[in-house]
Every structure is written in structure tokens, then in C-alpha cells.
Image: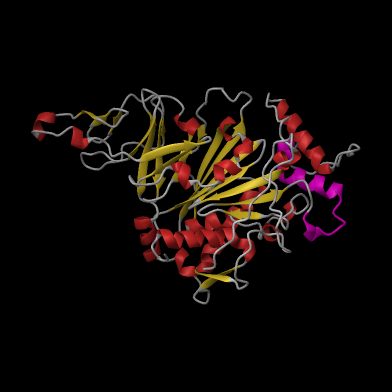
């Protein structure tokens, strides 16, 4: 595969807070970075369907990389614990008695039963429901029923197996590799690039977990390009510029900066303020406290644009909940910074909200889990975190107009990938984040230097 060029983004205007400005050296097609080759990049379709390739991922990818486990809100108090499934792997993330964040492999050291399922509150120990062996919240074995029958037990050797755990912003990550680099080094330039958003102020308010009939990489690909907006999200074209959406690639991770509150150039000059207002209300009017159905466009005050007006309406709506967005520029409210975190997470950062989308492997290459986390900015950044409502795993979820369309295409994508006449994906520079993902996947799996 062809390497990509890293573009350096500028800064928001002085006196305002917002995402990094688009790179100044954007080429004619308004996408950056540009690929060094002008030929399409080919990716074998078998990567999405092959059992052998999935086994290679299970051996060399999932046990070796940092992955999202949960939000800090899920483990906000001592005794809170969350099960995190990563394909065949399973970890317990727990807040111990002293308030420290810990993680362990989710397995009883007696006969191998799973210790924890779902979300637990107020635990004083981790007890296996099968034979009732128990460990304290720091992973030390504390009780073995009928212990005399075992003879001499080495308690120290039977502690829970630690898993690396750390957090960034409101997100908890785990890594099963004891020799893994730190989370800070793994995230590369992403924390600095998103520093303007004060991610620590966000609190998780909802989660979903949905079984989907596709490979986990199909989920990740779908949230790694805006090329598909013209196809399945035409309602968004009136209020999103999907053409001038520069992209930046670090090493493992990447980002796209997508302007909202303006019409796509694909609609031509006749897309006026009324078109922008109607589209924005339909797609995300709830951000302004309005129903999603289109409403009549208000007049734009002198000295403002429709984009400024929409941003001001969002600030006003957040103020009703005690959230002050006055420090955020129009770009800070209406330019989406969409980060793709290798290997399987997409983070959507706005001034007023944060969304996390994760594709996790299922029991075979044709199934996966789509996990979503929704965060809202807290009125007080020092306010205590509260556990969000945790939804059960389901086979179907209603995500709203836009994300529902993304989920529907997952099934048809996986079916197409199995067709004998389709052997390779053909990717363009607009899909540079997908290409970069495959470059890193090849490195992680030992398929390239």
C-alpha cells in the first residue's frame, strides 16, 4: 500500500475555542493528506470474510492493542465493575476500595468460569458464581470454599491476572499485553488535537450494544469516510460540506474535519439559507431543542451567517441545562472532528456533545457488535460522575435517521463481500483513513515491515 502524507493543521482564531483549522495545503479535491501515488489502493475482500484472517486478528491484534472498554462513568465509584468483551477475550474493569482503576482477565482461577457479566455496582469482592471462589477488588484471592480439599494452595499464584488499564478524557481503555506502550504514546497526536474540547467535562448518558451481521471492519470503514454521504445520507447534504472535509493522518490514528451548517457543493448555488436550516433541523434539530422535522428558516441577523445563527441556537439550548458554551466559536460548535482510533473506535467531537462508535468482532467473520456511547457536557466540570443507564445487548436498536442508514448498509456490504467475482476493494484518496487502517493492520499482523 502507498504511504500517506501527514498535513499539519492550524489553530482556531484568537479569542475563540474550536477545532484545528483545516490544513492550508489542501489540494484541488480538498482532501488531505494526499497519497504519494495517483493509483487506487487495493485491499483483499477476503480480509472481511476469511476465518483464517479472523484467527490471525485474534492472535496478533486483539491481545496487543489498546481498546475502549467503557466510560469513566461506568466505574465512577469504588465497587463499580464492568465486563468488557473483545471477541473471545474478556476483561473486568473495576474501581477498587481506594479509588484506583484496575482491570483483570475475566476468569476464575479455579475452573475458568467467567467472573463478571454486564455492569455491577457496590461490589466488595469479585466472587465466582459457580463455586464461590472470591477475590478482593485488587485481585488478591481471599476465599476458597472447602479449602482443605485442595491441600497446600499458593494464594499469591492464584490472584487475578492483571490487564493494563488507563483513561483519556471520559473513556477507559484496556490492553491485554503486559509489555504494551503507554496509552498516552499509543494515542499519538489525538489528545493534543482535541484539547480545545475539554473532554473531561463530558459525562456518559447512554450506551447501546447491537449485534450486526457483518465483519467488524465493515463497521469501522463506514465511519472512516464522508464519500458515502451523497449516497445514503442525502438529507445531510443541505447542512454539511462533505467535499471540503480535510483529513489528517498521524501513524495509527486519523481525523476528518467536517463543516456543518453549510450546504454541500454538490447541491450547487441554489442551496440557500432555507435549505441549510431545513436540512439541519431534519438531521440534528434536537441540538437546538427543536423537533427533527424541518421548520421555517428564521431571519439571519445582520453581521451573522446562518451557520452563526445555528451555533447560537445550540448555545442557547445548552444554557437551559446550565451548560455554558460561550467560549466555543462557531467552528467549535459546528465543525465535527471525527477521530478514527486504531483499530476499531470512532470518536465524534463537537462543542456540545461527544459520540463514540465501536466495532467489535463476533464469534465468526460475518458477525460483530456495534457499541455506542453518548456523552453530554456537564454544567460543572467538577460534578461527580453518575453511572449511565446500561442497555442490554440486542439484535436491533433505533439510532435515528442517519445512523440507522449506516447500520442498514452493513448487511448488504457483508453479503457483497462474499461474492466470488469481487476480490478486492478499490480505494481512493478520499478513503485515506480506511487505507491507513489497513496499513496499520498489516503491520500489527506481521504482513508488512
Q: Which of 1 and 49 is in front in this view?
A: 1
Residue 331, given in percent of the width and then of the height, sits at: 73, 42
Q: In this view, does 92 lie above or below 250?
A: above
Residue 101 occupies which quadrant of the picture? top left
Q: Can residue 140 be seen in this view?
A: yes
Q: In this view, does 25 lie to the left or right of 251?
A: right
Q: What residue is drawn where x is 53% and y is 60%?
A: 436
* Predominant SS along the magenta part: helix
Q: What residue is drawn where x is 55% and y is 51%?
A: 340
Residue 342, given in percent of the width and then of the height, sits at: 49, 52
Residue 339, given in percent of the width and then of the height, sits at: 58, 48
Q: In this view, does 44 lie above or below 161?
A: below
Q: Which colour scheme is used?
A: secondary structure
Q: Nearer the viewer, residue 230 or 429?
A: 429
Quarter of the figure with the C terminus: bottom left
Q: Is residue 316 left or right of residue 89?
A: right
Q: Is residue 158 above or below residue 49?
A: above
Tally of numbered tags: 0
Q: In this view, does 439 lie to the left or right of 302?
A: left
Residue 368 on the magenta span:
no
Residue 409 occupies which quadrant of the picture? bottom right
Residue 137, given in percent of the width and then of the height, sits at: 32, 28
Q: In this view, does 289 lie above or below 55?
A: above
Residue 4 occupies which quadrant of the picture? bottom right
Residue range corresponding to the magenta coloring: 264-289
Residue 286 on the magenta span:
yes
Residue extending furthest toward the bottom:
421
Q: Can residue 393 be seen in this view?
A: no
Residue extending furthest toward the right:
302
Amino acid at each position: 500500500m502507498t504511504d500517506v502524507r501527514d498535513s499539519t493543521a492550524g489553530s482556531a482564531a484568537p479569542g475563540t475555542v474550536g477545532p484545528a483549522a483545516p490544513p492550508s495545503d489542501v489540494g484541488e479535491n480538498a482532501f488531505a493528506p494526499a497519497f504519494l501515488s495517483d493509483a487506487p489502493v487495493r485491499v483483499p475482500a477476503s480480509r472481511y470474510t476469511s476465518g483464517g484472517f479472523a484467527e490471525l486478528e485474534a492472535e496478533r491484534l486483539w491481545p496487543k492493542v489498546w481498546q475502549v472498554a467503557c466510560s469513566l462513568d461506568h466505574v465512577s465509584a469504588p465497587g463499580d465493575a464492568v465486563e468488557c468483551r473483545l471477541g473471545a477475550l474478556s476483561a473486568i474493569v473495576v474501581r477498587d476500595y481506594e479509588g484506583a482503576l484496575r482491570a483483570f482477565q475475566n476468569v476464575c482461577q479455579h475452573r475458568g468460569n467467567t467472573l463478571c457479566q454486564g455492569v455491577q455496582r457496590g461490589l466488595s469482592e469479585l466472587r465466582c458464581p459457580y463455586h464461590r471462589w472470591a477475590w478482593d477488588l485488587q485481585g488478591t484471592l481471599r476465599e476458597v470454599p472447602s479449602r482443605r480439599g485442595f491441600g497446600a494452595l499458593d494464594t499469591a499464584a492464584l490472584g487475578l491476572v492483571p490487564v493494563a488499564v488507563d483513561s483519556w478524557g471520559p473513556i477507559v481503555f484496556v490492553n491485554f499485553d503486559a509489555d504494551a506502550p503507554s496509552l498516552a504514546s499509543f494515542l499519538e497526536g489525538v489528545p493534543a488535537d482535541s484539547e480545545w474540547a475539554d473532554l473531561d467535562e463530558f459525562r456518559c448518558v447512554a450506551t447501546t450494544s447491537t449485534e450486526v451481521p457483518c465483519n467488524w471492519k465493515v463497521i469501522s470503514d463506514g465511519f472512516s469516510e464522508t464519500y458515502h454521504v451523497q449516497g445514503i445520507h442525502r438529507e445531510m447534504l443541505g447542512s454539511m460540506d462533505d467535499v471540503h472535509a480535510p483529513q489528517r493522518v498521524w501513524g495509527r490514528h486519523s481525523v476528518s474535519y467536517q463543516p456543518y451548517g453549510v450546504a454541500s457543493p454538490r447541491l450547487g448555488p441554489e442551496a440557500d439559507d432555507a435549505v441549510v436550516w431545513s436540512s439541519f433541523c431534519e438531521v440534528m434539530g434536537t441540538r437546538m431543542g427543536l423537533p427533527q422535522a424541518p421548520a421555517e428558516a428564521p431571519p439571519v441577523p445582520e453581521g451573522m451567517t446562518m451557520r452563526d445563527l445555528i451555533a447560537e441556537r445550540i448555545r442557547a439550548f445548552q444554557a437551559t441545562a446550565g451548560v455554558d458554551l460561550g467560549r466555543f466559536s462557531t467552528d467549535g460548535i459546528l465543525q465535527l472532528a471525527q477521530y478514527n482510533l486504531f483499530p476499531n473506535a470512532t470518536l465524534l467531537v463537537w462543542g456540545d456533545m461527544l459520540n463514540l462508535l465501536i466495532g467489535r468482532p463476533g464469534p465468526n467473520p460475518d458477525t460483530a457488535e456495534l457499541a455506542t456511547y453518548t456523552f453530554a457536557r456537564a454544567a460543572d466540570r467538577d460534578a461527580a460522575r453518575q453511572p449511565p443507564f446500561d442497555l442490554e445487548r440486542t439484535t436491533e436498536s433505533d439510532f435515528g435517521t442517519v445512523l440507522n442508514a449506516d447500520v442498514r448498509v452493513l448487511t448488504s456490504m457483508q453479503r457483497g463481500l462474499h461474492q466470488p467475482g469481487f476480490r478486492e476493494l478499490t480505494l481512493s484518496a478520499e478513503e485515506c483513513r480506511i487505507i491507513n487502517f489497513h496499513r496499520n493492520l498489516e503491520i500489527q499482523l506481521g504482513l508488512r515491515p
